[in-house]
Image: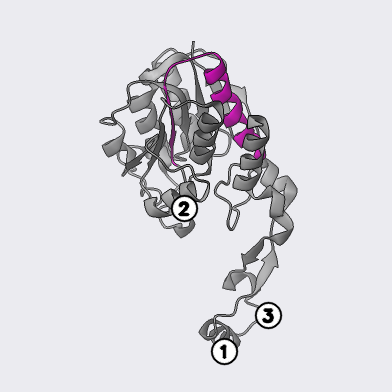
C-alpha cells in the first residue's frame, strides 16, 4: 500500500495524471503578429487569456518543461531518483535528515516528507531551504563563473514560503517534521540547526548557490548518504562549482547520471 501511495504522490506532484487537462497562459510575445495592441488591451481589461493545452509527456518525463501548476519541474526520472535515494537510506538505516536547497514550489521536499510518512519514520526532518524570492543576482566579483547566468528577474522562480507551505498542506504533509530555512543560502545554511544528513539535494543553478550549499552542508552528510545535484548537466556554473568542490576535498565517489541534467553520488 505504501508503494502505491508514493507512486500516486509522485504522479500528482508532476501532474502527469492530468497532462491533457493542463493549459498554459500564452505570453503576448508569442502571438504579437496575430493580435494588435488594441485587441490585447481589450482582452486584458476583461480578464481574457489566450491559452494553449499543456503537458507534453516526454518533456514532463525528463523535466524539460515548466509546468503551469505542478509542484515540481524536475520530471519523473529525477523525482524517481529522489525516491530511490530516500528509500535506500531508510532501508539501510543511514542516519540523518533530508534537505533540498532551492525548492521552487516544494515538490521534491513534499515527496521526501511523503516517503517518511509512508515508511512510518517520525524522527527525521525535511529541511526546505530557499530564498523564496527567486535567484540572487550574480556576484561576479566573487564568483566570475556565474557570468551570463542572471535569473534574478525571472518571476516564475520566485515562489513564497507561504505558497510552499500551502502546497505541503494540500497533501496533508505540513507538520513539525518539515522545517523551513528562509533566506539566501550564505545566510541560512551555515547556521542551520542540522546535525547530520542522509540526503542532500542541491538545486541552486549558480556557482555561488551551489558552493554555498556544499560548503555548509556536505560535511554533515553521513557516509552511506546521497548527494544529488539537479543542474549539473544543464548549467555550467553549477557543474564547475561541484567539480571544484570535489577536487578541493579529494572526493572520488562516482558521479552517476540520472538524466540530461541531474546526477548523484553516494558518500563513502
Label at residue 217: none
Describe the element under mark 2 as helix, strand or loop. Answer: helix
Considering only vertical position in the picture, is 73 above or below 44?
A: above
User: Within the image, what quadrant is residue 25 found in?
Assistant: bottom right
From the image, tell me which residue sits under label 3: 34
- Identify the residue shown where x is 74% and y is 46%: 58
Comparing 120 with 50, the one in front is 120
- Please say whether residue 182 is visible from this viewpoint: yes
CB-based contact (under 8 Å), mark 3 and mark 2 = no
From the image, tell me which residue sits under label 1: 38
User: Within the image, what quadrant is residue 206 found in?
Assistant: top left
User: Which callout, 3 or 2, points at the residue further toward the start of the chain?
Assistant: 3
The colour scheme is: one colour
- Identify the residue shown where x is 58% and y is 56%: 69
Q: CA distance from mark 3 to mark 2?
A: 29 Å
User: Which callout, 1 or 2, points at the residue further toward the start of the chain?
Assistant: 1
Comparing 217 with 8, the one in front is 8
Residue 150 among magenta residues: no
Q: Residues within 10 Å of mark 2 (few under 14, many from 20)?
A: some
Considering only vertical position in the picture, is 3 above or below 254?
A: below
Describe the element under mark 3 as helix, strand or loop. Answer: loop
Considering only vertical position in the picture, is 78 above or below 35?
A: above
Screen quadrant of the N terminus: top right
- Identify the residue shown where x is 58% and y is 28%: 263
Q: CA distance from mark 1 to mark 2?
A: 30 Å
Label at residue 157: 2
Q: Residues within 10 Å of mark 3 (few under 14, many from 20)?
A: few
The magenta span reads: 76-102
Residue 94 among magenta residues: yes
Q: Position of residue 221 (x, y in %)?
A: 41, 19
Q: CA distance from mark 1 to mark 3?
A: 12 Å
- Please say whether residue 105 is visible from this viewpoint: no
Amino acid at each position: 500500500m505504501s508503494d502505491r501511495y508514493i507512486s500516486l504522490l509522485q504522479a500528482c506532484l508532476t501532474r502527469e495524471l492530468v497532462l491533457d487537462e493542463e493549459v498554459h497562459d500564452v505570453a503576448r510575445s508569442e502571438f504579437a503578429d496575430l493580435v494588435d495592441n488594441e485587441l490585447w488591451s481589450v482582452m486584458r481589461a476583461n480578464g481574457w487569456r489566450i491559452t494553449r493545452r499543456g503537458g507534453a509527456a516526454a518533456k514532463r518525463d525528463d523535466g524539460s518543461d515548466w509546468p503551469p501548476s505542478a509542484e515540481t519541474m524536475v520530471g519523473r526520472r529525477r523525482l524517481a531518483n529522489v525516491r530511490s535515494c530516500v528509500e535506500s537510506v531508510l532501508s539501510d538505516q543511514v542516519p540523518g535528515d533530508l534537505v533540498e536547497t532551492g525548492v521552487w514550489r516544494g515538490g521534491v521536499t513534499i515527496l521526501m516528507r511523503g516517503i517518511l510518512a509512508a515508511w512510518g519514520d517520525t524522527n527525521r526532518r525535511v529541511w526546505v531551504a530557499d530564498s523564496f524570492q527567486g535567484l540572487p543576482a550574480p556576484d561576479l566579483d566573487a564568483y566570475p563563473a556565474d557570468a551570463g547566468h542572471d535569473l534574478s528577474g525571472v518571476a516564475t522562480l520566485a515562489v513564497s514560503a507561504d505558497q510552499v507551505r500551502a502546497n505541503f498542506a494540500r497533501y496533508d504533509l505540513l507538520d513539525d517534521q518539515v522545517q523551513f530555512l528562509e533566506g539566501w543560502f550564505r545566510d541560512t545554511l551555515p547556521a542551520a540547526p542540522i546535525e547530520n544528513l542522509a540526503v542532500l539535494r542541491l538545486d541552486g543553478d549558480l556557482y555561488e548557490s551551489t558552493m554555498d550549499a556544499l560548503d555548509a552542508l556536505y560535511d554533515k552528510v553521513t557516509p552511506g548518504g546521497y548527494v544529488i545535484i539537479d543542474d549539473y548537466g544543464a548549467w555550467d556554473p553549477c557543474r564547475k562549482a561541484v567539480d571544484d568542490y570535489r577536487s578541493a576535498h579529494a572526493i572520488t565517489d562516482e558521479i552517476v547520471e540520472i538524466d540530461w541534467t541531474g546526477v548523484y553520488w553516494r558518500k563513502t
